[in-house]
Image (cartoon, grey):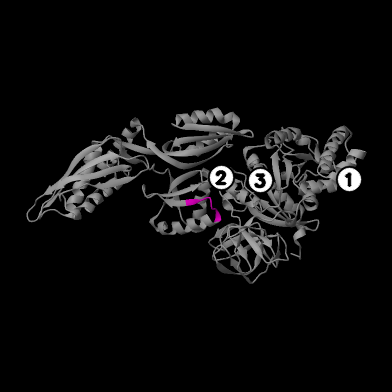
C-alpha cells in the first residue's frame, strides 16, 4: 500500500435492513476496483466480506467486516454491516467511526424496520448518506414508490441525482442528472458502462428532476442561490461543487439506483464517494473527555499531532489470537512501537499495523489519522479503550450498547467442558459486548443473554467452533419468591432425649409481612433471661437458613419480620443447634398460619412494532397477563411500554417475530415482584411437592 494522506481516505459503512443487498454492493465495490478477480456472491458461499462459517451457513451478515480499495486516487475503507436486529449493535458500533454511509433500500419492499433504525443512528451521528435504491431488476421494483416510502418513513431531505432507464427485468441504466447523460449498464456483471444521449421518452422527466436537483443545491449555498435566482440556471461544475458542499454539511442525501448483485450502477456510487463525500478531516472530532476531571476535550483529527486511537471492535480467535480494530483519531501509528492504554493504565507493545481485507490482513506502516486498522495480540486492550503514544488523561466517549432482550440457561454437554465454558464466554464477550453471562444465585443456573434467539444460537455455534465447548440452551427457571400476607404467633420447640445429653430449644415467634422490597428483619424482645443471649443468634440463623430454602415451594422467602418474644431453655440440654432447629420449626409453622403466597418477577418491556401490528401485539400482551403502560408513535412504528410476568414471555422472541414478520424488536428488564395468582401458585406448589417426594 503506497503512502497516502488523511484527505485521501473515505470511511464508508454499508447499511440496510437484512436482505437489501449490502454485502452484494460491497463485493461489487471490490470487484470494480480490481481487488477481487471475480464478482463474489453470498449465495455462492464465496463472499470475501461474509466469511464466518455462521454467515456462510445462514447467508446473512452477522459481524461487521472490513476491506479497502483504491478509486480515483482515494483509499476507500468499506464496512459491511449486519441488518438483522439480532446483530444490529455491530452496525451501531461501525457507524460510530464511519465518516459516511450508503443506505440500501429494496426497490420492491421500500423502507423496512431496520432501514429506519440504521437511518436514525446515521442521522444522530450526522453522517452524510447515499440512498441507493437496489434490486431495480426485480419484479415489482418501483423507483418512485421507493422514493415515496423514504419520504414518508425517514423524513429525509432527498436529492435525486439519477432516474432509472427501464423497469424490472428491462432495467438497463440510469439518467445522470448532473451530466445529463444516459449510463447504460452491462447485465453480465462486468460493470461495463456505456454513455449515451438521453432517451427521448425520459427528457421531460429528467428536466423536472434536474430542476429539483439544482434548487436543492442552490438552497444549500448562498452564493449559488443568488446566482440561481438571478439567472435560473447553474453550470454542471457549479452543480457538482454545490452537491459536494451540501453533502459535507449533510444538508441532503443523494439518491441513486441500480442492482448490486448484477454490478449495475455501482461505479457511479464509487465516483460519488471519492469525489464528493467527506474524508476524516472533513468531519467533526470524536467526543473526548479528561478521565480525571471529567471536562470535555477536543482532539483535532490531524496527522501532525500525537497519536490517539479509539478501539471500537475486538475479534477473538483461539488460533490467531485477539485482533484489536481501531480508528486512528490523531497522529500516526507506527509498527514495532510501544503505545499506552489510558483506560487500563498499561503499556502495550505492538508489532505490525494491519489493514483488514475480509478475513485476511495486510501489514502497512505507518497508519495515518483517520484510517481504520488492526493490531494483533494486545494483552490488556479491549473495546472502548483509548490508545496513545505517551501517558495522557484524555479518553474518547465509549460506545453504548442496548440491553439484551432474551436470556437462556446454558449448560455444558459434558463435564469436561464446565471448566472451559467461562473462559470461552469471556472471549466471546470481548468480541460481542451485548452477550452477557451470569449466574442466578437463586436458581443456581448459568444464564446467557443476547439480542435475540438467532444471536444466542450463533454464540453457541461459535463456542463449539472456536473453543471446542459444546453447550445446550434451555428455558431458564423462573425465580419465584415466597412471602406472607398475614400474621401469626407460634411456638417452635425442639426436644430430643436419646440417652446421655439431650437437645432442647424453645422459642416463641411473631411473624408478620414487610412492605414489598423491604427484605428480612429480625427483632429480639426477650426479657428476663427466658432465653440466654448467646442462643439468640442461633435463632436468627435458623430462620435465615429456612428462608433461603423456602417453605411452601422451595423458593427464597422475602419481606418478612420475625420477632422472638419468649421461650425457655434447659441448663444442660440446650445448645445452639437445638435453638436453630426450634426456630426453623417455628418459622415453618408460622408461615403456614400466615397466608403464604408466591411472588413472581414482573418485567418492564419496550416493544417497537409497525403500526398495523399494534392491535395484535396488545392482544397478545393481554393474553400473557400483561399491562400496557403507554404507547408512543415513532415514524410508522408504535413503541409500546408494558409490564408482563417473566413466566409469560420466556418465548416472546418467537412470538414477536411471527406477529410482525420479523419487523418488531423489544427490550426488557426486571422491574419488580408481585403476587402470583392463586390458580397458578397452586400448580407450582403442587409440582414442587411432587418433585420433593420423588427426590
- Residue 206, image x, y percentages: 85, 36
Q: Which residue is mark 3?
A: 124
Residue segment shown in magenta: 431-436
Q: Which residue is mark 1?
A: 236
Q: Earlier in the sequence, mark 2 or mark 1?
A: 2
Q: Which quadrant of the figure has residue 86?
A: top right
Which quarter of the rendered picture does the C terminus lie within? top left
User: Compared with residue 89, is residue 371 higher up or lower down, i.e. above or below?
Assistant: below
Crowding around mark 3 (Cα neighbors within 10 Å: few <14, some 14 to 19, many 20+) is: few
The Cα atoms of the two marked residues, 2 and 1, are separated by: 44 Å
The Cα atoms of the two marked residues, 2 and 3, are separated by: 21 Å
675 drawn magenta? no
- Kindly give the residue lying farthest to the front in the view shown: 528
Q: Earlier in the sequence, mark 3 or mark 1?
A: 3
Residue sitting at x 89%, y 40%: 228
**Numbered tag placed on residue 86 in the rendering:** 2
Amino acid at each position: 500500500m503506497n503512502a497516502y494522506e488523511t484527505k485521501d481516505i473515505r470511511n464508508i459503512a454499508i447499511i440496510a435492513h437484512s436482505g437489501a443487498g449490502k454485502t452484494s454492493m460491497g463485493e461489487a465495490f471490490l470487484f470494480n476496483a480490481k481487488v477481487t478477480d471475480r464478482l463474489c456472491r453470498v449465495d455462492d458461499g464465496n463472499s470475501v466480506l461474509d466469511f464466518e462459517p455462521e454467515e456462510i451457513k445462514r447467508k446473512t451478515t452477522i459481524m461487521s467486516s472490513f476491506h479497502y480499495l483504491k478509486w480515483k486516487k482515494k483509499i476507500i475503507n468499506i464496512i459491511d454491516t449486519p441488518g438483522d436486529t439480532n446483530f444490529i449493535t455491530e452496525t451501531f458500533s461501525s457507524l460510530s467511526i464511519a465518516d459516511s454511509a450508503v443506505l440500501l433500500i429494496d426497490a420492491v419492499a421500500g423502507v423496512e424496520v431496520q432501514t429506519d433504525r440504521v437511518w436514525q443512528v446515521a442521522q444522530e451521528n450526522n453522517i452524510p448518506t447515499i440512498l441507493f435504491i437496489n434490486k431495480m431488476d426485480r419484479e415489482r421494483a418501483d423507483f418512485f414508490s421507493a422514493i415515496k416510502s423514504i419520504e414518508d418513513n425517514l423524513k429525509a431531505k432527498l436529492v435525486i441525482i439519477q432516474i432509472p432507464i427501464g423497469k424490472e427485468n428491462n432495467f438497463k441504466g440510469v439518467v445522470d442528472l448532473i451530466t445529463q447523460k444516459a449510463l447504460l449498464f452491462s447485465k453480465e456483471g462486468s460493470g461495463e458502462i456505456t454513455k449515451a444521449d438521453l432517451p427521448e421518452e425520459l427528457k421531460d422527466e429528467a428536466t423536472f428532476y434536474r430542476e429539483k436537483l439544482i434548487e436543492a443545491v442552490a438552497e444549500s449555498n448562498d452564493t449559488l442561490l443568488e446566482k440561481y435566482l438571478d439567472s435560473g440556471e447553474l453550470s454542471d461544475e457549479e452543480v457538482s461543487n454545490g452537491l459536494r458542499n451540501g453533502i459535507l454539511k449533510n444538508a441532503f442525501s443523494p439518491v441513486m439506483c441500480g442492482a448490486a448483485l448484477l454490478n449495475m450502477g455501482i461505479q457511479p456510487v464509487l465516483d460519488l464517494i471519492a469525489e464528493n463525500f467527506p474524508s476524516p478531516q472533513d468531519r467533526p472530532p470524536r467526543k473526548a473527555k479528561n478521565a480525571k476531571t471529567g471536562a470535555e476535550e477536543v482532539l483535532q483529527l490531524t496527522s501532525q499531532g500525537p497519536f490517539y486511537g479509539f478501539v471500537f471492535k475486538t475479534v477473538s480467535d483461539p488460533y490467531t489470537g485477539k485482533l484489536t480494530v481501531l480508528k486512528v483519531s490523531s497522529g500516526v501509528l507506527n509498527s514495532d512501537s510501544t503505545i499506552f492504554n489510558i483506560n487500563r493504565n498499561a503499556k502495550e507493545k505492538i508489532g505490525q499495523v494491519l489493514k483488514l481485507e475480509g478475513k485476511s490482513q495486510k501489514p502497512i506502516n505507518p497508519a495515518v489519522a483517520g484510517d481504520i486498522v488492526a493490531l494483533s495480540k494486545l494483552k490488556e486492550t479491549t473495546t472502548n479503550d483509548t490508545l496513545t503514544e505517551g501517558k495522557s488523561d484524555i479518553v474518547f466517549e465509549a460506545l453504548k450498547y442496548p440491553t439484551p432482550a432474551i436470556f437462556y440457561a446454558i449448560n455444558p454437554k459434558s463435564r469436561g467442558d464446565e471448566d472451559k465454558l467461562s473462559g470461552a464466554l469471556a472471549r466471546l464477550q470481548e468480541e460481542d459486548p451485548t452477550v452477557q453471562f451470569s449466574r442466578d444465585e437463586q436458581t443456581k443456573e448459568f444464564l446467557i443473554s443476547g439480542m435475540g434467539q438467532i444471536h444466542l444460537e450463533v454464540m453457541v455455534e461459535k463456542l463449539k467452533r472456536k473453543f471446542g465447548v459444546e453447550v445446550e440452551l434451555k428455558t431458564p427457571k423462573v425465580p419465584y419468591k415466597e412471602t406472607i400476607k398475614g400474621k401469626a404467633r407460634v411456638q417452635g420447640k425442639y426436644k430430643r432425649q436419646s440417652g446421655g445429653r439431650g437437645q432442647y430449644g424453645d422459642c416463641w415467634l411473631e411473624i408478620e409481612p414487610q412492605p414489598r422490597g423491604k427484605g428480612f428483619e429480625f427483632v429480639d424482645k426477650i426479657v428476663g433471661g427466658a432465653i440466654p443471649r448467646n442462643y439468640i443468634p442461633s435463632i436468627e440463623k435458623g430462620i435465615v437458613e429456612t428462608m433461603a430454602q423456602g417453605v411452601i415451594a422451595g423458593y427464597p422467602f422475602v419481606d418478612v419480620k420475625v420477632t422472638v418474644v419468649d421461650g425457655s431453655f434447659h441448663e444442660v440440654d440446650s445448645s445452639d443447634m437445638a435453638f436453630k432447629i426450634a426456630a426453623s420449626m417455628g418459622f415453618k409453622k408460622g408461615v403456614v398460619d400466615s397466608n403464604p403466597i408466591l411472588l413472581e418477577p414482573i418485567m418492564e418491556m419496550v416493544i417497537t412494532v409497525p403500526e398495523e401490528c399494534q392491535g395484535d401485539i396488545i392482544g397478545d400482551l393481554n393474553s400473557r397477563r400483561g399491562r400496557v403502560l403507554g404507547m408512543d408513535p415513532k415514524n410508522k412504528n408504535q413503541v409500546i411500554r408494558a409490564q408482563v410476568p417473566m413466566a409469560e414471555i420466556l418465548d416472546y422472541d418467537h412470538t414477536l417475530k411471527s406477529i410482525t414478520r420479523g419487523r418488531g424488536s423489544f427490550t426488557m428488564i426486571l422491574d419488580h415482584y408481585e403476587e402470583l395468582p392463586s390458580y397458578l401458585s397452586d400448580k407450582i406448589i403442587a409440582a414442587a411437592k411432587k418433585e420433593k417426594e420423588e427426590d
